[in-house]
Structures are given as C-alpha cells and as structure tokens.
Amino acid sequence: MIHFAWPLIFLCLPLPFLARSLFPAGKENLAAIKVPFFAEIKAASKKRLFAQAKGQTLLLWLLWGLLVTAAARPQMSGGVQEYMIPVRDIVLALDVSRSMLNQDMNEAGKNRLDTVKEAASAFVNMRQNDRIGIVLFAEQTSLYVPLTVDTTALQEMLNGVQAGLLGSLTSVGDAIGLSLKYLRDSKAKHKIIVLLTDGMNNAGNISPEEALEAAKQAGVKIHTVGAGSDVDQKTEIDIDFLSRAARETGGLFFTVKDRNAVNEAYRKIAENEPSSKAPVYLIRYRDLYFWPLSMFGIIISSVVFKRFLERLMFARRAK
C-alpha cells in the first residue's frame, strides 16, 4: 500500500491558483486593430488562444502536481523486518597509571598493562552482542572509547592504550563516576562496569564510597579486578573496597598476579554476563518519489524538444 511520508505538502497544490488570483495577467487590447473583417479575426484568434491556453494550463498543473507528489515522498511498505539490539552496556575502566608499567606478571618483556590489554581484548571478542566502552584512569580520568558494538575498532583502540599518559596517581572514584555518567542515559537492560586497578585511590574529586553509592542507586553492576604481584598488600591496593564494590552491586571480585589469572578473571566475568539480544520489529519503506520526478523530467524534456523542432522548422521556412 502506498502512503506519503509528508502528506501536508499537498496543501501547496493551490499555490499557483492563488498566485494567479493575486497577480492577474494583463489583457490584450485587440480592439486597437482597425480592419474591416476585425470581428472574424477576433473570434478566430480568441478560439485559438483559448485552446492553447487551456492546454498549457493543464500541462502546467500536471507538472506542478508531479513536483508536489514527489516532494510528499510517496512510499511503499517493504514488510516487517526483525532487528536485534544489545541488552547490555559494558564500560571497561582500565588503570593506566605509571605503576602499570611494572613487569611482574610472569610475562617476559611485558608489563602489567600489556597483559591486561590481551585479556581485555579477548573479553571484547566474546561480547559480540553488547555495546562496550573504555574509560582510562590514573591521576586523571578520560573516556577513551564511547559505547559501541564495533568490536574491531575496540580491539584497535585497546592496542593503542599506553600507561603513564594520565599521571602516576590513581583515581578509582572518578573512574567509576565517569563510567556511570556514560551509562546514565543507556537504554540497555543491564549496565556493567569492569574495573581493573593496581593501586589505591589517591587522586580525583569523587571518593570511591560516593561512587559506589551512586552505582548502587543507578542499578549498575561492578566487577572489580586487582592486579599485580603485590595485590595482597593492602598498602598498595584497596582490597577491601574492591571486594565490597563487587559484592554490594552483584559483581565479581578477583585478584590477579599473572597472565593466566587475568585471562581467567575476564573469562568468568564474561560467563557471569550471558550474551543476549532483544528483538525489535521495524517496518521498512521503499521510496517512490523518483517516479513522479522522472515523469516531470520526461515531460519537460519533451516540451523543450518540441519547441526546438518548431523553431528549427520556422528558421528553415524563413530561408
């Protein structure tokens, strides 16, 4: 069935009639011609001019109607199609303080961040049906990648993450706060933060406790990972807060000291958040405006070609 996307445009149809009413054309003064057979010439002239004017008027109205019809965007339904949209939005909050450059994860030639990036990349690869964003934090906090389903772009951006660019301190509270900010307007059913850090909160404007309370009120789940060989030393990592943040929001808490432990932590988090999508049904429409527009073009071309032929014939007769 054909319908019009902008049907109100048809209100423009009477515009030429209104314009003609407001600006009437001047009348030709045939009475100025003084010849004996004036009455016959006048009658024949009026008849011929009336026929020509009527044909031109109908043609102009047809052309105007075709333009208005095309502008109203006629469309035909292409049927109902099913689309799948993600039901989870996940923010990966990664600590990129200078301490992440320490090489204590039993990986030759690799620092903590290199090991974490590999595990995070594998995690992203397992979340094909989710939107994922990346927040980087140290002394400062920054949104690195907005929420997206483009896992290829996420992988490339993860490879480019470097430690030390945002300072040497750690702002855990700000990291959670910024992640919550970008999850606040999310329409996803499930909102998750995966927080990885190797230090205690010693910078930022938001305390970890304030950020945790905001996460609980927003219904956001937080999974936490404490990384590094000194992970059990509370003077280096706030184990109490990380475990409490995960427990009070329904998330998981891990301490990791090597590559296998990091991979296992991200794998268990992925298993805890089963991949799923919600169906959305949309009606697709096929635009038909090119048909009246094509007819307009054909008629205009025909009129121009006809006038050209008439002038050509007239020029030949004049010779």
Image (spheres, helix red, strand yellow):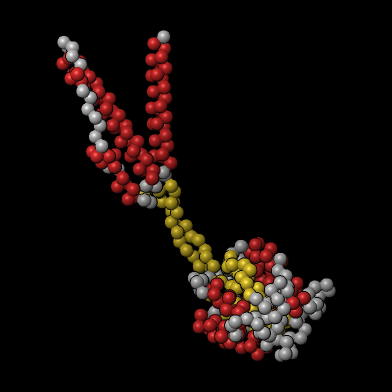
Whole-percent x, y for residue 43 in the image:
18, 19
Q: Residue at x 28, y 31 (%)?
A: 57
- Quadrant of image for the C terminus: top left
Q: Residue at x 64, y 78 (%)?
A: 195
Q: Is residue 51 found left or right of 258 in the rendered image?
A: left
Whole-percent x, y for residue 101 in the image:
77, 76
Q: Residue at x 54, y 67 (%)?
A: 86
Q: Is residue 314 above or below residue 150?
A: above
Q: Is residue 31 above or below residue 20?
A: above
- Which is nearer the eye, 177 or 55? 177
Q: Residue at x 39, y 23 (%)?
A: 307
- Which is nearer the eye, 25 or 91? 25
Q: Quadrant of residue 231?
A: bottom right
Q: Is residue 194 above or below residue 15?
A: below
Q: Quadrant of residue 316?
A: top left
Q: Is residue 139 found left or right of 192 in the rendered image?
A: right
Tally the marks: 0
Q: Is residue 31 visible?
A: yes
Whole-percent x, y for residue 133 in the image:
60, 69
As drawn, the residue found furthest toward the front would be: 32
Q: Is residue 126 visible?
A: no
Q: Quadrant of residue 129?
A: bottom right
Whole-percent x, y for residue 46 in the image:
21, 22
